[in-house]
Amino acid sequence: MARFVLALDQGTTSSRSVILNEKAELIGQSQKEFTQIYPKSGWVEHDPKEIWESQLETISQLLKGSNITSSDISAIGITNQRETTVVWNKVTGIPIYNAIVWQDRRTSDYCQELAPKGYAKSIQDKTGLVLDAYFSASKINWILENIPNAREQAEKGELAFGTVDSWLVWKLTNGKKHITDVSNASRTLLFNIHTLEWDQELLGLFEIPVHMLPQVVESSGELALTDKSIFGVEIPITGIIGDQQSALFGQMCIEPGLLKCTYGTGCFLMLNTGNEIVKSNHKMLSTIAWKIGNQTTYAVEGSVFIGGAVIQWLRDELGFFKEAADSEDLAEASEDNGGVYFVPALTGLGAPYWDANTRGSIFGISRGTNKSHLTRAALESIGFQVNDILNAMAEDVKFPIQNLRADGGAAANQLLLQFQSDISRICVQRPSSIESTAIGAAYLAGLGINLWTIDFLKANWKMHSEYTPQLDQEIADNLLDHWKEAITRTLGWNS
């Protein structure tokens, strides 16, 4: 009987499901966008119930469209938007507040108040992260402090915290399992990446009761069983991993020195550092990539908060085009950016700046500036931000970076990938499937039931296209100089 692996890819703007066959081939996928909630400037929320329902809908559509039944699914892998924080009642299973999304900046002031007290260094030493509202800890604290009776319930052991993977597993197991894997735990600002345990000192700092937290498990193996009420049969959940780590695995960047960039809502660069925790001098993050068996793999990461989201903003708020994919044609209507530079700091700037107070800005507008120039500048801003991180990473790891594997929805944009190669002077490789995030979770799930081997998966990775520098070096340098000037003038705008 044929064996299939189902992967759930719960992202920032949509839920997706994919199915791989025994040969690790992608044979079907389904996607559904869900509501983005913006209660105040800088606040971003999701409805956890809608997340769950949209994920279920994609599964149903996928199985029906692929003519596959639940009984045909041998294993499930889960990958998810990281840091996004859900707190729910353990008895009722009902969230006490909306999910606070990783992009949310409401706790920036709280984090800045902690920084002068000397906690930043201790936090980085233990977690590999910077003290920032991006991560889960301050979001949990906000919920406990601002939702009526939340702290009292938490102290009584009535509340559960989880990143989205934990929420999905809770729902899939009908409340029987409250778990997360090491990669997601390492993004909370509460997990010691050296000891692989929740850190009591950090829990005390953020005033979070330890019994709110999920059990931490490996990224692949026998992790949970779905409740029979969900699919009619029990299906093993054998892979759990945060989305960027999943893309690293899906791109088969499983050896030290291999690097990927996921061009999604944000852009996330991750460099495999093997069993070594590399401490960055350029505000990169040290994080856990995955744990398989007794082997923990680490990585260095840089995050761009607004990547493909800047194209969504042009589509949804300014009405430049109806579909995000149309942005490439509109940008190509102009030979260049017309002197326009767009710093898309709509929710602050991530690595290597980590400036929560910065807001977006556009420079170089003239009488002749049109939608095409602005769209091209928006696309180029993605490449510029990624290049800033590439340069910082290269200095941290002390060797030049020559290849970049690209995935994510925006990696379908050839103009963007060519621009990335041009300004970064590197080879950019796009795989045959840009669904590396979902594929990574499926790979781990398949490994968890011994369906595949690592060597088989390495041989399975195939390249679709390759981009090498075509732009004159002097022109590229001029573009980078103007970008640096735009960044300099933007930093600290709201401070």
Image (tube, helix red, strand yellow):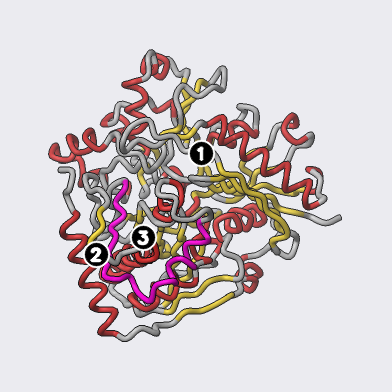
Magenta range is: 324-346
Q: Residue at point 45% right, 45% down?
A: 82
Q: Nearer the viewer, residue 324 or 57?
A: 324
Res 254 seen here: no
Q: Which mark is residue 164?
A: 1
Residue 183 spot, x, y in % from top left: 46, 49
Q: Residue at point 47% right, 79% down?
A: 467
Badge count: 3
Q: Earlier in the sequence, mark 2 or mark 1?
A: 1
Tag 3 residue = 300
Per the model, the C-alpha gap separating discs 2 and 1 is 44 Å
Q: Nearer the viewer, residue 16 or 395?
A: 16
Element at label 1: helix
Q: Left of 121 or right of it: where is 50? A: right
Residue 269 spot, x, y in % from top left: 40, 62
Q: Nearer the viewer, residue 265 or 244?
A: 265
Q: Nearer the viewer, mark 2 or mark 3?
A: 2
Residue 113 spot, x, y in % from top left: 17, 35
Q: Earlier in the sequence, mark 2 or mark 3?
A: 3
Report the amino acid beneath label 3: Val
Q: Nearer the viewer, residue 382 or 100?
A: 382
10 Å crowding of disc 1: few (<14), some (14-19), many (20+): many
